[in-house]
Image (cartoon, helix red, strand yellow):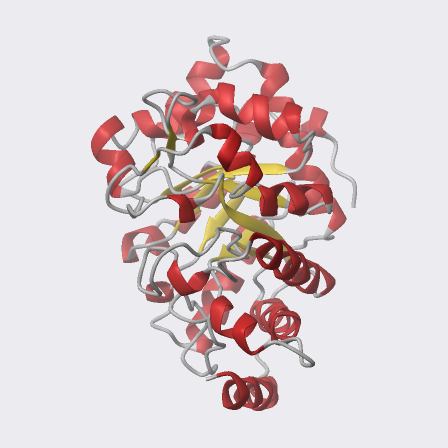
Amino acid sequence: MKYNIKELSLEEKIGQMIIIGLNTETSIKNLEEIIEKYKVGGVLLYKRNYHQNYEEMIEIVNKIKALNQKNKVPIFISIDQEGGRVNRTPKEFKNLPSANKLVKKSGEEDFVKLSGKITGEILHKLGVNMDFAPVLDIKRFSDDHAIGDRAFSENIEEVSKYGLEYIQALQEKGIISIAKHFPGHGATKTDSHFRLPKIDEEIETLEKEDMQPFKKAMEHKVDGILIGHLKIAKVTGKLPASMSRRFITKYIRKKYRYNGLVITDDVRMKGVRIRYGRNNAVKKAFLACNDMIIFKYDNDIGVIDKIIQLAKEDKIKMKRINKSVTRILKVKEQYTLNNALIEKDEAFIKDINKQIEEIREKVL
């Protein structure tokens, strides 16, 4: 289905540029406000939303879809599903091994590609249409580091190779792939969930190393890039990359000529929230020319009204808003998103778990 951007109001356009993290019971109770009032472009689900339960997850996904039927544009239903320690699937599903473990055992059998295919099948059956995966950071530290075994490899070429395979496997199953965490979380010891990491390497080094897998993914039409809250010495100044208009424009848009989605990491992560404030962080992310901003539901989301007001005052240019919304609508058209409700399929769980167990026996 084609969507006409001219039919969207300013409020609807701003809504399209937002992904709300549903991390609390309050956020679930306020889904009507989130979807019907603000008409957000996407939501991000967490295990706590459905108590790790398959039936409850289907109920929540269907509630989101039903509420969005009144809106002009289908909604992104997203999740962080990687396998290993970042696992958001209901407890009825067995867990696939981490990216690093898959690569170490890949040879004649390509466990990465198979894992991507299985993940895509599961998400499709759950009604999820966007996955914040794969991790394209380079493994530089121990397995329990913020990135650690979530990364495919210590080797740049392997990260690029397996990253592309995983992206394509998700896409073939109808799942939008958002690669993370540009320009490379593996280059820092700090976890951006708690403090703002600083990358001390020169930008030239980053381009030759950490940014290479992302560059390859952009060249091969990954659907989106998640940009991390990472400060880069002599490049982003006091701001993280996610809030640096200069960085996003210079590298992603101009140097790499990428016209896919640029999405922030959650701008209400502790490190960002403490430094900039819960609402100011959202504003800064908008002003930095990100296409979509992720932020968790935190008591309320009235900051969206303030963003709309900034646009009305021409502090956020309409031309820039239209560019972002055009990219968002293009992806939704490409994947033919819809608001059709999901049916439960208990038999599928048994079949897919058998495939996962076969991988686990060979990899773990």
| Residue shown at the point (67%, 45%) measured from the top left | 216
Q: Nearer the viewer, residue 183 or 54?
A: 183
Q: Residue furthest left?
A: 274
Q: Position of residue 19 (x, y in %)?
A: 47, 43
Q: Position of residue 188 (x, y in %)?
A: 35, 44
Q: Position of residue 318 (x, y in %)?
A: 59, 15
Q: Residue furthest right?
A: 2
Relative side of 361 to 275, left or right = right
Q: Position of residue 144 (x, y in %)?
A: 31, 64
Q: Nearer the viewer, residue 141 or 49?
A: 141
Q: Nearer the viewer, residue 213 or 325?
A: 213
| Residue shown at the point (68%, 38%) measured from the top left | 329
Q: Evaluate whether residue 24 shows in this view.
A: yes
| Quarter residue 92 falls in | bottom left
| Quarter residue 13 falls in | top right
Position of the C terminus by quadrant: bottom left
Q: Nearer the viewer, residue 273 or 129?
A: 273
| Quarter residue 233 falls in | top left
| Residue shown at the point (41%, 34%) measured from the top left | 201
Q: How many marks?
A: 0
- Judge whether 28 appears above or below 251 on screen: below
Relative side of 227 to 303, left or right = right
| Residue shown at the point (53%, 74%) measured from the top left | 104
